Image: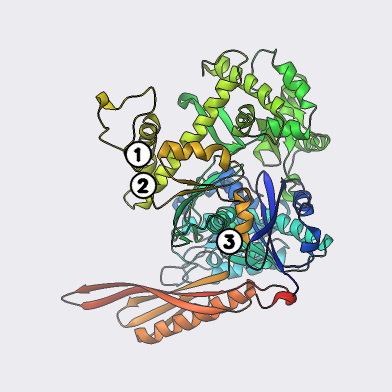
C-alpha cells in the first residue's frame, strides 16, 4: 500500500519549520531554517530540503500556520490601506483607534449607513465615494469598507465594494463579511487590519505555492485560522484577519498532540511573542469577544490566548522610569546577524573601545519588500533602500558620516521595510551557553557594549566593565519573571474574577512573591538555601497552580527558559518531543469549520425581523422567523465550508436567546442569535481521498 504523508509548514518571525506526518499523525521528519522575510520562499525551500525527498512525492495535504500576521498587529506594522467609512461620526472614528493605527490620511468619512433596524439613514454620495476611491488607489495595497449597522443591512458596504471593483484592481473587504456583532468602531478596526494583512498573506501563499510547485508537490494548500480550524488559500486571501493567531492556535493543537495532555497550560515562545492558552478536555477556549493581540482586539473568533511582545528576538531596552524592558519591538539578535554577516564582528570589536552612545550595536537590514510601501518612498528613502541591498549598514558610522542616510533608514524601519539589530534574550542565552546555534562571540561583544550603554547613558546596572555574564543573567531572569507573570495573569483571568488589566496588576505582585519564596509547589516545602520563611514559620500565603494542569512548553526557546519558570511557580513541566516545531505539527491536525450567525429581533410587538446579508426581512410569528434564520445560516455556512476546502460537510446549530420574564407581560422576546457551524475534513489530493 502506498504511504501518504501530511506536510505542515510554519513561517514565524525567526524560523520556518516543516514537518512530515504519516497517516497515523505521527512525526516522521522535522526541519527548521531561518525565515527569510525579504523572500519567504528561500526559507521555506531550505526547510523542505532537509526533509526526506521521496516522502515529499507522496504528500496529500499541505497545511500552513504563521505568526507573521500576529506579529504585524503586535508590532503595529502593515501595508498602506484606505478605509471607507459610511455613516460614522467623529466620536466613532476617534473611539475606533483608526487614526493611531493608520493616520488620518488613510480614512475617508462618507455619508450613509443604516440604523439598528436596518433602515438607511442617508443615501451614499456616489460622486464623493468615487473620487475618494480613485484618489487613494494608486498609493495603497487594499481597501477596507465599514458602514454603520452593516451587520443589520450591508447594502452600503456592498455598493462601495462594487465601486472599488469597478474603478480599481485593488483587493477590498467589507466589515459585515468579517464580523456579525454590533460595535461599529471595533468592526472598522477589524476590517482595516484585514486590509493591511492581505499583501503579507499573499506573499506567504505565493512563496509556498512556488516552492511546492518547484518540488512537484501537487496537494491542496490549507491555512490555519486563529480558532485552530482550516481554510484554503483562496479563503485566506479574502479574509486574512482570520489568520491572526494562526501560529498560536496551531501551537496549542500541536502541543496537545505531542504531549498527549488534554488538560494543560500551553506556553509557546517564539522570536517575537509569547502566547499562553488554557486547554481543557483537549480543546482550547475560544475568545468569542475577540482575542487581545498587542493593543488591538479585532472581531475574530480565535483561541483565547494571552499574547505578549516577548520573544527571543525582543529588544532589551531602557524604558524611562521603569528601567529595563524587553519588547515588544523585534530586532535582529547580534548573534544571528554575525552568523549571517561575519564581518560585523570587526565593527563590534571596535565599538568595545569607544565611548558609549545610542547607535552602537545598531545595524539596519532589509526586512521585507512591499510594493505599495516602496512606491510611496521619498527619494532619500528609496536611496537608503537600494543601499541596504548590499547588506547591513552600521548606524553608528551612518550617524557620523551621512546623517541624511541615517534619518532615511530610521523612516524605513518605522515603515516596516527595514529592521534594526540589537541586544536580545537570544544573545543573552548564547552568552550563558543556553543556546549555541548562532555566533557566541557577537553575543558576548554585544552584551558588553549594551551593558556599558545602560550603565553610563541611563544609570542602570552595577555590572563590572567588560562583564558579559551578569547583564546576560539579568536579562534571562527578566524573561523568566515576565513569563511567570503572564502565566499567573492567565490563571487569574481564567478564574473569571478579573479582567485583563486588573489581573495584570495583581499578577505582578504575585510573581514577585512566588519568585522571592522560591516557588510554590503543590506540597509544603522548605525555603530555599539562604532564605527563611517568615520568622522561621510556614508562610501564610502560597501561590499554587492546579496540579492536574501541567505547563506544556513549546517553541524553539522552550528548553532554555521554562525549566526555571516551572521551578519558580512550582508547576509540572512537559517539554514534548518535537516541541520546537509544534506549530507545524498543529497545522495539519485541524478540520475545516465555518460559522454563520443570524440575528432575529422584535422591533415592535408581534413583528420578528431576520437580519442577513440580503438585508432585513419581517415575519408575523417567531417560529417562521427562526426557521428562516436556520435555513439562511445553514445554507451560507455549508457553502462557506465547501468554498473553504472541506471534503464533506456536516452542520450543527446553536441558539442564544435574550428573553425576559415578568408578571405583567409574561415571556418577552428581545433577540435570538442562530448559529450554524459547518465542519468537515479538508480536501486532500485524489490519491488520498479516503482521508
How many angstroms separate mark 1 from mark 3 (CA)?
A: 32 Å
Helix, strand or loop under label 2: helix
Question: Which residue corresponds to the image point at 66% horizontal and 57% vertical from the top-left?
Answer: 198
The mark total stands at: 3
Question: Residue 461 vs residue 22: left or right?
Answer: left
Among numbered discs 1 and 2, the one appearing first in the sequence: 2
Among numbered discs 3 and 2, the one appearing first in the sequence: 3
Q: Position of residue 62 (x, y in %)?
A: 70, 64
How many angstroms separate mark 1 from mark 2 (CA)?
A: 8 Å
Foreground of the two, 103 or 4: 4
List the residue tagged with mark 2. Answer: 492
Do tag 1 and tag 2 residues touch (Cβ < 8 Å)? yes
Q: Quadrant of the C terminus?
A: bottom right
Question: Which residue corresponds to the image point at 47% horizontal and 62% vertical from the top-left?
Answer: 283
Q: Determine if residue 14 is in view.
A: yes
Q: Position of residue 444 (x, y in %)?
A: 66, 23
Quadrant position of residue 61: bottom right
Helix, strand or loop under label 3: loop
What label does residue 225 carry, if any? 3
Amino acid at each position: 500500500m502506498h504511504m501518504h504523508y501530511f506536510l505542515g509548514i510554519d513561517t514565524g518571525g525567526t524560523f520556518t519549520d516543516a514537518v512530515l506526518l504519516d497517516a497515523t499523525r505521527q512525526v516522521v521528519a522535522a526541519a527548521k531554517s531561518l525565515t527569510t522575510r525579504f523572500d519567504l520562499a528561500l526559507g521555506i525551500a531550505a526547510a523542505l530540503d532537509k526533509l526526506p525527498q521521496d516522502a515529499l512525492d507522496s504528500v496529500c495535504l499541505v497545511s500552513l500556520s504563521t505568526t507573521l500576521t500576529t506579529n504585524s498587529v503586535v508590532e503595529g506594522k502593515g501595508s498602506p490601506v484606505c478605509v471607507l467609512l459610511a455613516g460614522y461620526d467623529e466620536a466613532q472614528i476617534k473611539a475606533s483607534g483608526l487614526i493611531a493605527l493608520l493616520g488620518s490620511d488613510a480614512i475617508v468619512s462618507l455619508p450613509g449607513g443604516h440604523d439598528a433596524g436596518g433602515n438607511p439613514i442617508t443615501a451614499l454620495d456616489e460622486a464623493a465615494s468615487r473620487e475618494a476611491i480613485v484618489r487613494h488607489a494608486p498609493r495603497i495595497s487594499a481597501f477596507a469598507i465599514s458602514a454603520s449597522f452593516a451587520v443589520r443591512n450591508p447594502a452600503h458596504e456592498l455598493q462601495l465594494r462594487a465601486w472599488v471593483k469597478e474603478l480599481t484592481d485593488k483587493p477590498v473587504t467589507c466589515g459585515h463579511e468579517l464580523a456579525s456583532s454590533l460595535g461599529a468602531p471595533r468592526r472598522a478596526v477589524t476590517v482595516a487590519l484585514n486590509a493591511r494583512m492581505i499583501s503579507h498573506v499573499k506573499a506567504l501563499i505565493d512563496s509556498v505555492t512556488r516552492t511546492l510547485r518547484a518540488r512537484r508537490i501537487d496537494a491542496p494548500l490549507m491555512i490555519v485560522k486563529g480558532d485552530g480550524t482550516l481554510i484554503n488559500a483562496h479563503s485566506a486571501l479574502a479574509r486574512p484577519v482570520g489568520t491572526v493567531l494562526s501560529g498560536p492556535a496551531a501551537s496549542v493543537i500541536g502541543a496537545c498532540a505531542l504531549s498527549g495532555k488534554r488538560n494543560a497550560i500551553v506556553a509557546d515562545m517564539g522570536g517575537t511573542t509569547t502566547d499562553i492558552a488554557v486547554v481543557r478536555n483537549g480543546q482550547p477556549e475560544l475568545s468569542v469577544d475577540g482575542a487581545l493581540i498587542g493593543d488591538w482586539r479585532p472581531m475574530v473568533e480565535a483561541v483565547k490566548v494571552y499574547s505578549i511582545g516577548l520573544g527571543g528576538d525582543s529588544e532589551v531596552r531602557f524604558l524611562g522610569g521603569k528601567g529595563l524592558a524587553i519588547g515588544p519591538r523585534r530586532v535582529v539578535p547580534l548573534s544571528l546577524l554575525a552568523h549571517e554577516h561575519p564581518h560585523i564582528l570587526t565593527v563590534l570589536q571596535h565599538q568595545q573601545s569607544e565611548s558609549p552612545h545610542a547607535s552602537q550595536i545598531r545595524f539596519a537590514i532589509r526586512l521585507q519588500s512591499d510594493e505599495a510601501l516602496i512606491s510611496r518612498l521619498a527619494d532619500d528613502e528609496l536611496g537608503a533602500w537600494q543601499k541596504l541591498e548590499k547588506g547591513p549598514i552600521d548606524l553608528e558610522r551612518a550617524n557620523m558620516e551621512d546623517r541624511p542616510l541615517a534619518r532615511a533608514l530610521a523612516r524605513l524601519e518605522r515603515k516596516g521595510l527595514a529592521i534594526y539589530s540589537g541586544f536580545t534574550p537570544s544573545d543573552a542565552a548564547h552568552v550563558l551557553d543556553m543556546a549555541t546555534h548562532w555566533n557566541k562571540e557577537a553575543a558576548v561583544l554585544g552584551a558588553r557594549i549594551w551593558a556599558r550603554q545602560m550603565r553610563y547613558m541611563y544609570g542602570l546596572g552595577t555590572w563590572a566593565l567588560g562583564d558579559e555574564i551578569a547583564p546576560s543573567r539579568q536579562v534571562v531572569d527578566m524573561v523568566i519573571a515576565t513569563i511567570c507573570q503572564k502565566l499567573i495573569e492567565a490563571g487569574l483571568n481564567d478564574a473569571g474574577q478579573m479582567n485583563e488589566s486588573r489581573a495584570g496588576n495583581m499578577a505582578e505582585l504575585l510573581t514577585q512573591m512566588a519568585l522571592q519564596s522560591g516557588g510554590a509547589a503543590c506540597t509544603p516545602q522548605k525555603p530555599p538555601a539562604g532564605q527563611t520563611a517568615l520568622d522561621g514559620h510556614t508562610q501564610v500565603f502560597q501561590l499554587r497552580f492546579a496540579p492536574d494542569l501541567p505547563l506544556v512548553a513549546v517553541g524553539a526557546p522552550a528548553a532554555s527558559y521554562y525549566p526555571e519558570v516551572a521551578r519558580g511557580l512550582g508547576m509540572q513541566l512537559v517539554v514534548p518531543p518535537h516541541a520546537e516545531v509544534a506549530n507545524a505539527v498543529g497545522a495539519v491536525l485541524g478540520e475545516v469549520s465555518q460559522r454563520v450567525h443570524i440575528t432575529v429581533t422584535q422591533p415592535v410587538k408581534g413583528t420578528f425581523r431576520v437580519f442577513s446579508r440580503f438585508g432585513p426581512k419581517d415575519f408575523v410569528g417567531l417560529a417562521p422567523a427562526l426557521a428562516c434564520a436556520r435555513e439562511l445560516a445553514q445554507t451560507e455556512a455549508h457553502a462557506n465550508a465547501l468554498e473553504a476546502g472541506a471534503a464533506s460537510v456536516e452542520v450543527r446549530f446553536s441558539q442564544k436567546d435574550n428573553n425576559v420574564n415578568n408578571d405583567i407581560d409574561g415571556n418577552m422576546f428581545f433577540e435570538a442569535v442562530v448559529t450554524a457551524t459547518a465542519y468537515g475534513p479538508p480536501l486532500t489530493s485524489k490519491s488520498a481521498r479516503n482521508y
